[in-house]
Amino acid sequence: MSKKPFNIGLIGPGFMGRTHSNAYRRVSNFFDLEHTPVLKAICGRNRENAQAFADQWGYESVETDWRKLVERDDIDAIDICTPNNLHAEIAIAAAQAGKAILCEKPLAMNVEEGLRMVEAIEKAGVPNTVWYNYRRVPAVTLVKKLIDEGRLGRIFHYRANFLQDWTISADLPQGGAALWRLDAQAAGSGVTGDLLAHCIDTALWLNGSIRDVSAMTEIFVKERMHNLTGQKEKVTIDDACLFHCHFANGSLGQFEATRYARGHKALYTFEINGEKASVRWDLHDLHHLEYFDHSDDSVIRGWHDVHVTDGDHPYMENWWVPGLQIGYEHTFVHQVADFLTAIAKGQPCAPTFRDALETQRVCDAVINSANSRRWMDVD
Amino acid sequence: MSKKPFNIGLIGPGFMGRTHSNAYRRVSNFFDLEHTPVLKAICGRNRENAQAFADQWGYESVETDWRKLVERDDIDAIDICTPNNLHAEIAIAAAQAGKAILCEKPLAMNVEEGLRMVEAIEKAGVPNTVWYNYRRVPAVTLVKKLIDEGRLGRIFHYRANFLQDWTISADLPQGGAALWRLDAQAAGSGVTGDLLAHCIDTALWLNGSIRDVSAMTEIFVKERMHNLTGQKEKVTIDDACLFHCHFANGSLGQFEATRYARGHKALYTFEINGEKASVRWDLHDLHHLEYFDHSDDSVIRGWHDVHVTDGDHPYMENWWVPGLQIGYEHTFVHQVADFLTAIAKGQPCAPTFRDALETQRVCDAVINSANSRRWMDVD
Amino acid sequence: MSKKPFNIGLIGPGFMGRTHSNAYRRVSNFFDLEHTPVLKAICGRNRENAQAFADQWGYESVETDWRKLVERDDIDAIDICTPNNLHAEIAIAAAQAGKAILCEKPLAMNVEEGLRMVEAIEKAGVPNTVWYNYRRVPAVTLVKKLIDEGRLGRIFHYRANFLQDWTISADLPQGGAALWRLDAQAAGSGVTGDLLAHCIDTALWLNGSIRDVSAMTEIFVKERMHNLTGQKEKVTIDDACLFHCHFANGSLGQFEATRYARGHKALYTFEINGEKASVRWDLHDLHHLEYFDHSDDSVIRGWHDVHVTDGDHPYMENWWVPGLQIGYEHTFVHQVADFLTAIAKGQPCAPTFRDALETQRVCDAVINSANSRRWMDVD
Amino acid sequence: MSKKPFNIGLIGPGFMGRTHSNAYRRVSNFFDLEHTPVLKAICGRNRENAQAFADQWGYESVETDWRKLVERDDIDAIDICTPNNLHAEIAIAAAQAGKAILCEKPLAMNVEEGLRMVEAIEKAGVPNTVWYNYRRVPAVTLVKKLIDEGRLGRIFHYRANFLQDWTISADLPQGGAALWRLDAQAAGSGVTGDLLAHCIDTALWLNGSIRDVSAMTEIFVKERMHNLTGQKEKVTIDDACLFHCHFANGSLGQFEATRYARGHKALYTFEINGEKASVRWDLHDLHHLEYFDHSDDSVIRGWHDVHVTDGDHPYMENWWVPGLQIGYEHTFVHQVADFLTAIAKGQPCAPTFRDALETQRVCDAVINSANSRRWMDVD
């Protein structure tokens, strides 16, 4: 086993930090790669938390100041799992330090910030990727393949939802620790950046660019206790966001994200209707793809329920045997595998920062459209 | 509208009487037939009930003695909807009177009775059919077509269940009126004749004859109030019946019927596994057929969910438009349409009495096997 | 059987004419009503077609001029099944003649026409209803009941789609006979009036009025052969229409209708997310209701798959027994039953013309919003 | 991180070896345990293969003779992943050497062998468990909890299937390497020990002991090329096995396993019908549990589709957040976690060898019943 070590410094020992750490630890058992990730350092503002995280995941060292981490010579890549408002500063510093960068989504607080990040990273010429992990659900990757093979033909409709219900209770506070996603200061936006951004990333990848959008947002619970102030504060993030749009290829898009859809935990779904075939997918059963092919014999034509666990499905030959499902966490393993493969080949690993900037442009247009009650071009 | 009248005399103004009456009334609106059924007479022991039924359904006359009905010159066909213990006597008399006969299932109380019925009817040469209506669910008819086209190839497995839950409560009485199905005197057997017989009829039609069976039956609630005696009486029908078997074509069968499957109302299901393709169907969603075809491209291979409502699906061009489902009652309309078509062509209409006798043979073998705890040949 | 005859004169012997005729013929077999519908006269411009329809369905007479029909003394009710551009003229004349009126949806070509119809009918004081039949799918009626009982609590989201795929082929012509729905002259609009109107009617009934809308429409195939001119003509109806909206109760709506959703025949779906519970329904499995109740014990909490076939479900005690499904056509039977019940009680039968005018207002706002690319108030 | 090392010596670097190695590597990241497994040694007859496996999974050393492994002082536990015909010899030796033992299922080639294993292990007093991993799918563990809480009430029916289709092709050879499962010398039986044994283990756990069985087996492809002899040889394993049975609690069981069910890869399913509630589960969607509760309000009563991913579901608080599914491999992690927890507490970890012996008794009775065509008592 003469693999090259690839030393990771991860900032943000929280939920996303766990998913990434797990991916780094597992990838070499399942994928044959030139590099093997090494959990070199974890960085968190609270040393005790960071140390506990290091113990749990086997990080070799702990930092409490991300700037120090970025300056360390023994670090090959910086993985940014902080709240969104820190992405830009860290990424730009890491780029300047010549580190490879893996950044949690969404890329930035807004397009302006994102653009500075892209410029920094491209100037530095460092490998980079943004963790829009759902591209690498095997069923979703399969959709990309089916589209590229021309199986769907001309696309007419693209529909995507991301439905959750965890913020319905008015007693849930906002801000601080695990709840920074409810705080516009830390998150930039609500469901738009947190959930819709995933839908948009997949859509741009599968169906090309979006031309213009008409959106609406809503805040259902107007005030919540704030964990940092101890006061009831106005809620400033969007609880729900809907938009429709024109894609550049002439198809129509319809999108929605909300945390007020009782009965859904993390129901990211999309459906694409093409002239020749259609596909449907949802995250609650991520190992399935529904596929309708108009060229099937008419009497037995119907939606195929494809159990995406066969050896010829994307990524699946690396796991178990047909019929045995994988889960959420594997998408991160796939992204690490692809990132390391890309590095070995000297190629970019999508979605790059530049790809993610496109998603940011759509998010900004959506928010602007909702605020102005007007159609907005994406540019 | 110069259609020939086809005069029906129906015996038994109960639940099945309703389904048949509805079928006679509707068939000419949807199927282009030489004959049109006329509801000539309803026969029931209780005149008041029979009259109310006649009023509801538009029968021209009422009889209380089935022998009188059978003798009437203005009757072309006798429809037998009585409890099972009267089928033989009525059918034989009707055959001798030269009437066409439509008999509710199961054919008889046992093979001996059934054989006499078949002999009588074949001697008389009268048109005849038994109401195993589920053959004529469009999705089930479609399965027959797929098998006949060779799409499934060699068959390995046939599985069928008929699951209900309406007799779980120990407070439910047995016998009399609507509850004759719980009385062995009137019904012959319990779930075997009532539910399994449907599964067996379909199986024989789709997969050929059954060679031998190994069965078990159970009575979960041993005593129930009897409506006719007013006493707690021993329950003599089978509450549940399971068997496995060899089909003549070498495939293996597994069957089960019960009225103790909490959560299922009338869940008749079957699945057939062939070398090249498999099918699945259930009565709770009778307008769907699930179909798996191994010859599909591997990456998009999966069970097809066929919404059996297109114009090229069996019977469906006579109804509405694609996507709009029909229901339970339509199966009876189809059987009337096919029966009248067969009469016009001078052909038999399956399942004939002789076909139904085969089902009876399997039912008897099943009961015998369960009682003796031994494999039984079907012969 | 001393039921009062209720004499129907139906205009338009086409697809909808069949569904209504079937409903009139069946209702008395299943519902205990004071009146029994009599198929007195069918009216169609082509006498041969009309006569064939009369023969098929048992109409006593044939008319070729609807004005004559409206003037006949032996007609109690006029049923309007013509293309949309004739609704207003016929309905107003029928009202003036004192007839009860059952009008196919959508009510009118636009709000102005609809308003004149409502005024005429209210001035005449005649019984009236519009055939938004999907309200009377038992599962949909059940949703209304659940909402009225307060089971959903505050509503956050309402989503509805109506997806078809029958016009994808560019070879399909427009106009004339069965294809008047593709001709703006006859239909007024495309999917907006044909499909979205159903979604809107249900939404207004279940979730109250809509305040404002932002819409987009699209014509995917710009030119088609026209059956009446024999030329390629510009397509003027909308192939697809999407909108989002605010309901008066503060919830957000998202709607879409299209005839370019490959794989869907008549997939009308809706989902409603409330604070306490959510519901989902679709027309391809119309006998199911999916229901999520947050008050269920957490470990067994999940979407209930309710097979809406029990005796305590709306309308179902009139049909068969639990587990046995009904279909599309029964919704029309239910509407006739309710209409005749309302007449017997001297009450209105929703949706009345006035109710349907509200739907028309939303449709007009949707079309205006799409054309102007601006939010439109509904008023 | 002052965890006690727990040194594993694993025999059999094949498919099951991978699943176990993965489990040992991951458990400490997700479960807070006293011990942490250390991959001390891998043992395989082919050194090259074993070394490659060691490299892939990080084993510290390689052995080619399992007897040497068993004698090593630095090994705490022996994990047996060999073909079935080696289980007994290895397990007995390991017990005598005082090692904890984790043995792949089925326990043994037959009851006689299994009994010797149990005696050895109980005499030695070593911790032991058998890898019937499906007990630890969270949804399956939840079923156990629901039954123990009395939610199902008296059980009437237990149904289980294990359906695969990978041996349909007559061109598939038997024997050697990955195909030892098709060789009776190595496997003991075919689907009975490989697949049905899983169904039986779960059934005994959930529904108690089985009293008697009536079974049938079949070999569909009678001869196959044998990889070890290079000749066409008679196939001696069972391709399919069906049985029904009485449970000691009075309920009826129906079981089937086959590798000839076209369309199913690894479809292990079971359903349990109780007086008060029923449950259904299948391995192709292992993160779902279907649950029907008769005590639900009748109008909204239906099967609950429980997405078993909430924090209060078994094992799930150790993984991600609600809505995010885990997969097949996690069941092994759970078994390691429970085994190490049991060791820390000095308690047994079910299924123990003795538990697995019960499963073996049923398997033997099933094979005997099939061979003799008679009911067989389990004892």
Image (cartoon, coloured by chain):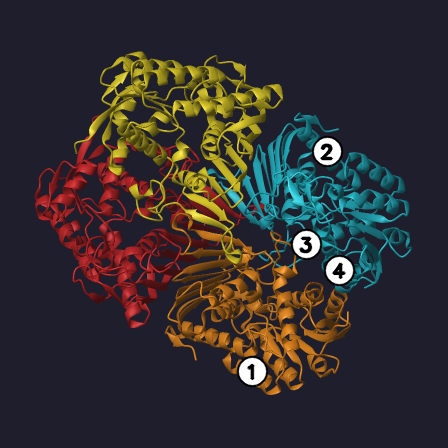
Chain colours: A orange, B yellow, C red, D cyan
Tell which subunit mark 1 falls on: A
Mark earlier in primary sequence (4, 3): 4
Query: Tag 1, which secondary structure?
Result: helix
Q: In this figure, which residue is indicated by the disc labeled 1?
A: A118
In the image, what residue type sits under mark 4? Arg
In the image, what residue type sits under mark 1? Val
Q: Position of residue C26 (x, y in %)?
A: 27, 35
Q: Indicate whether B150 appears above or below C163.
A: above
Mark earlier in primary sequence (4, 2): 4
Tell which subunit mark 2 falls on: D
* Disc 4 to disc 2, C-alpha distance: 35 Å
Q: Quadrant of residue D48?
A: bottom right
**Category of crowding for the residue at label 4, using alpha-carbon neighbours closer than 10 angstroms: few (below 14), some (14–19), many (at least 20):** some
Task: Give a yes or no on whether discs 4 and 3 share a subunit.
Answer: yes
Q: Position of residue A41 (x, y in %)?
A: 74, 74
* Disc 4 to disc 3, C-alpha distance: 12 Å
Find residue D25 and name its label.
4
Q: In this figure, which residue is indicated by the disc labeled 3?
A: D330
In the image, what residue type sits under mark 3? His
Image quadrant for the N terminus of chain A? Answer: bottom right
Query: Tag 4, which secondary structure?
Result: helix
**Category of crowding for the residue at label 3, using alpha-carbon neighbours closer than 10 angstroms: few (below 14), some (14–19), many (at least 20):** many
* Tag 3 and tag 1, C-beta contact below 8 Å: no
Task: Give a yes or no on whether discs 2 and 3 share a subunit.
Answer: yes
* Mark 1 or 4: the one toward you: 4
